[in-house]
């Protein structure tokens, strides 16, 4: 009888030990589940956060291209010169805007690469020039220091 009692007691002790370990594993599993959920929430919050826009883009030349890959505009800075060129659908320059040696200028070109009109300004002068279809200067209006001027040219 005594062996049966000790066997029963041994089985009961083993059952108690198994139940205690089961409870401990339950707590560990609950903690791990909570940790996984918390990391998922934190990761989701980080992924949802919108990326911050860059503060500055620094390049010496920037070219915008159309859907076909042809240049549509180019912004360039070389030494003391800065220019913006806008191209037509055929890839020909049509508008030039620039700053060169302290003078700023705007030039409108025809589809045949001929100047049509230009405007330039410096420290003490400004000028507007109109061209004919062949690109020859025909009208020039300007001011140098405080002196105005007008020039008309015939064919």
Image (spheres, grey):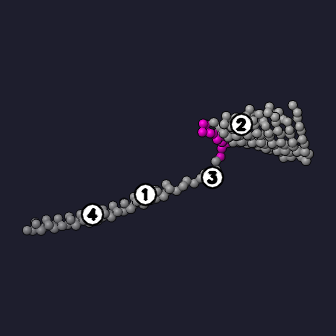
Q: Which residues are magenta?
A: 58-69
Q: Is residue 65 magenta?
A: yes
Q: Is residue 116 visible?
A: yes
What residue is shown with label 4?
22
What residue is shown with label 1?
40
Q: Are marks 1 and 4 in contact (CB under 8 Å)?
A: no
The mark lying in front, picked from 3 and 2, is 2
Instruction: State which quadrant residue 13 falls in.
Output: bottom left
The mark lying in front, picked from 2 and 1, is 2
The mark lying in front, picked from 1 and 4, is 1
Give whichever of discs 1 and 4 has the lower sequence position: 4
Image mark for residue 55: 3
Image mark for residue 77: none
Residue at left 50%, top 56%? 48
Image mark for residue 93: 2
Residue at left 8%, top 68%? 1
Element class at badge 2? strand
């Amino acid at each position: 009888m005594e062996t049966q009692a000790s066997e029963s007691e041994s089985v009961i002790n083993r059952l108690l030990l198994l139940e205690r370990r089961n409870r401990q594993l339950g707590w560990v599993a609950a903690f791990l589940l909570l940790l996984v959920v918390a990391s998922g929430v934190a990761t989701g919050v980080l992924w949802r956060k919108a990326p911050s826009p860059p503060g500055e883009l620094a390049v010496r030349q920037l070219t915008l291209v159309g859907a076909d890959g042809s240049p549509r505009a180019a912004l360039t800075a070389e030494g003391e010169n800065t220019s913006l060129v806008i191209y037509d659908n055929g890839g020909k320059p049509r508008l030039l805007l620039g700053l060169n040696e302290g003078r700023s200028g705007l030039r409108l070109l025809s589809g045949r690469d001929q100047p049509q009109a230009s405007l330039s300004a410096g420290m003490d002068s400004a000028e507007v020039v109109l061209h004919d279809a062949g690109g020859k200067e025909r009208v020039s209006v300007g001011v140098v220091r405080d002196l105005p001027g007008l020039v008309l040219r015939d064919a």
